[in-house]
Image (spheres, rainbow, N blue to C red):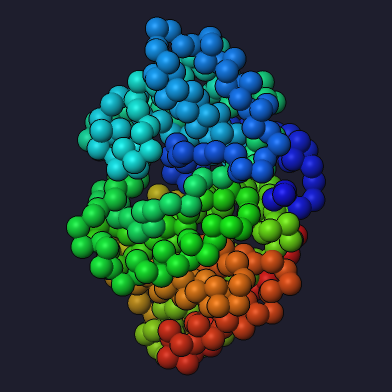
Amino acid sequence: MHTILKNSLSDLKDSLLQLGLPGDEYESHTLLCPLQLHKNSKLHYKLSLLIDKHVEMTKGQRGLKQLEVYRQHWQWVVLNLSRAIFINCWVVVALDSKPYQRDMGSKRYGINHASIKAIVDYLEAQGLIDVAAERQYQNSASIRRIFPSVALAGQLWEYFLDQEQPIAGPYLTINETDDKWEETIFTVSNIESHPDMDDMIAINEFLKPHRWACKAPIRLVYQHNPFQGGRLLTPFQCLADRRKRIRINTTIDDEPICELDFDAHHLRLNVAFNAKEYAGDTPYEDICVKAGVASRAMVKKFITVAMGASDEKSGKSSLMLDGFGSDVIERIHQGALKRYPKLDLFNGWGIFAQNYDSQILKDVMLEGIKEDIVCLPLPNAVAVQQQHRGWAKDVMLETWREKMGGVMTKIKVDLP
């Protein structure tokens, strides 16, 4: 079974490598995770030969049991670097043992520092990976960001289609730190009784037999506490889709997909919640007119920052760092309030929007289970097989109206 719809995987690989190395923003990084080939893959033997070659070169004085563990780590590194090509992200690995001792995911799968360091040092010495400048966690733990060289990519690209992460918990996690480079930490206390736990188990159990690109668990991740601002996260969301349209050209169970996107989602949520009204067909453009600003992108950026900021001073400072002039900031601010007088800005409303977003998408996915329809969550959107787009649009609109007291919204459909 393949998960890429149109172009050959080799052509997509070449296209993505032409983009060069990933950017340095947080979104261009992915943590090392335990990947495997699906059981029906025809590439098991070929992958085994590749791993055996590298293990033989680097095994040192390891005994049989140690070699078995070491070989498993080679598989994880190889398949993560294969995935990195197609999501155009650095793979983040720790340089010291502290994160491995602390992180519940590393403990769960037995990922150990010594094996990872030996593998990464070897790949770097052989010129098989590009390595970005080191960064520091808030707790002073160093990390290394790696990406396959063109030569290594030529050996790894074909494994992408057949790789998957086992669907296994935890499905609800808490990131207890503000440091985006920190590992996501699973907190056991009080989490098993969380009201979303049964829903996340049901969703992942339903998805187990299905196939899609970057198959992995879908997790609900909270910041600091398990009650506000949860986000539905899964690696499928990381597939390139702006500079190169990879994700929209993938499949679910061999069927082409489409993506249904809540238009101007967080702005519409804000207006619906605070003013109990429909935001109109073109909310960003409406604000452009009121503000006397031609750029829809600037208005969208302002709204995103203003809703996420906890206060006006920090929000406007952030906008100025992004190149906004103070006069433009004020014009957009006043234009937004002229169009939507009850719009809640610079008050941390983004946390509420994020929570509503995840709850709406989760409810849509649960409705999909009833109809045996796979729905994959994206930021403010879902991906479904094209044959189910009518069903998905109806369910998304109805779910949104139920959450927002009957207020309407607007949905865009994206096709390959």
How many labels sit on residues? 0
Residue in the picture at 73% in, 72% down: 387
Give whichever of 403, 311 is nearer the camera. 403
The residue drawn where x is 66% and y is 47% is 243
Query: In the image as oriented, which residue stretches furthest toward the top?
Result: 61
The residue at 41%/31% (across/down) is: 93
As displayed, is residue 40 above or below residue 302? above
Q: Quadrant of residue 396?
A: bottom right
Task: Name the side, left or right, on which 97 lies relative to 231.
Answer: left
Q: Position of residue 25 (x, y in %)?
A: 46, 42
- Given residues 153 and 296, the one toward you in this image is 153
Question: Which corner quadrant of the image does residue 257 belong to?
Answer: bottom right
Considering only vertical position in the picture, is 33 above or below 129? Answer: below
* The one of 304 and 162 positioned closer to us in this rendering: 162
Residue projecting furthest to the left: 189
Residue 32, percent across and down? Answer: 45, 36
Q: Which quarter of the figure has residue 259? A: bottom right
Q: Is residue 22 above or below residue 362?
A: above
Q: Does residue 329 appear left or right of residue 175 in this picture?
A: right
- Please say whether residue 406 is visible from this viewpoint: yes
Pick the quarter of the image with the C terminus: bottom right
Residue at the image position 60 percent from the left and 67 percent from the top: 374
In the rendered image of this protein, does residue 251 appear above or below residue 333? above
Residue 346 is at least partly visible in this image? no
In the displayed structure, does residue 239 sit left or right of residue 194? Answer: right
Please provide percent x and percent y for residue 334. Answer: 42, 76
Residue 316 position within the rendered picture, expressed as x and y whole percent measured from the top left: 35, 60
